[in-house]
Amino acid sequence: MFYPFYFDPTYILVLIGVVLSLLASGKVKSTFARFSKMRNSRGITGAEAAEQVLHRAGIYDVRVERVGGNLTDHYDPRSKVLRLSDTVYGSTSVAAVGVATHECGHAIQHARGYAPLKLRSTLVPIANFGAQIAWPLILIGLLFNSQSSTLFINLGIIAFSGAVLFQLITLPVEFNASNRAIRMIADSGMMYGEEIVAAKKVLNAAALTYVASAATAILQLLRIILLTGGRRRND
């Protein structure tokens, strides 16, 4: 017997998310690689730039450490450690300085009590738990034909919505850190002219990855709503 191939149209949303993520990842990698070859005129390394920016902001209790990997740079607010990757820590490129000062932006946000950063930190456990529990709840709801199935599905959607909210809150946090970085670079005289323009291009490319992540999360939530819409209406 012939069974016709069934195509789930909601897979288009998944495909769009994958394409957006790949494009954003490729953009940041190519932009970073391009400007990693451009040495800043002062010959300052990423680690030195971070130290200078932190001290200029009156922050002396944040350690700057090297971490393995490529573009694994991040600020850890719990231990007050700013970790710079191998390609940033000792590099004198404008890309390295841009990334290092961006992470300093997060340290300054933390020191100043920047509200979106505090909210994002609060949402971390909620988002992680929501992302893990969402699909099991939805699958339970789809497996049973009863009024309780709608409850499980709705709980799953709410749980996944927490992960989406986290991605949305991340956007102003990252954009603000990048804006702080560019201002600090310019105000300190760390770099000038074309070097600042290049650093801005690196940070703008990096910001696209967060935009893509938020868009992917929204598309996934939309797919969940579309897949479960019929069951919720029937119940």
Image (cartoon, helix red, strand yellow):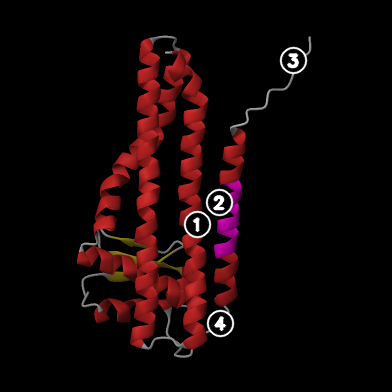
Query: Tag 1's secondary structure?
Result: helix
In the picture, the disc for residue 38 is 4
Q: Residues within 10 Å of mark 4 (few under 14, many from 20)?
A: some
Earlier along the polypeptide chain: callout 4 or callout 2?
Answer: 2
Judged by depth in the image, the label closer to the viewer, 3 or 4, is 3
Earlier along the polypeptide chain: callout 1 or callout 3?
Answer: 3
Residue under pointer 3: 3
| Amino acid type at mark 2 | Ser
Query: Tag 4's secondary structure?
Result: loop
Residue under pointer 1: 209
Judged by depth in the image, the label closer to the viewer, 4 or 1, is 1
Q: Is residue 224 left or right of residue 163?
A: right
Examine the image and state in which quarter residue 104 appears: bottom left
* Magenta stretch, residue numbers: 18-28
Residue pictured at 37% horizontal, 25% vertical: 154
Is residue 208 or residue 83 the one in the foreground? 208
Q: Are marks 2 and 1 in contact (CB under 8 Å)?
A: yes
* Distance from the alpha carbon under mark 3 to that under mark 2: 34 Å
Residue pictured at 50% horizontal, 83% vertical: 195
The quadrant of the picture occupied by the C terminus is: top left
* Distance from the alpha carbon under mark 4 to that under mark 2: 26 Å
* Distance from the alpha carbon under mark 4 to that under mark 1: 23 Å
Residue pictured at 37% horizontal, 88% vertical: 189
Residue 113: image location, x then y, percent: 20, 62
Q: Is residue 52 left or right of residue 235?
A: left
Judged by depth in the image, the label closer to the viewer, 4 or 2, is 2
Is residue 68 or residue 147 the one in the foreground? 147
Q: Is residue 202 left or right of residue 104?
A: right
Q: Residues within 10 Å of mark 1 (few under 14, many from 20)?
A: many
Look at the picture and state if 52 lies above or below 160: below
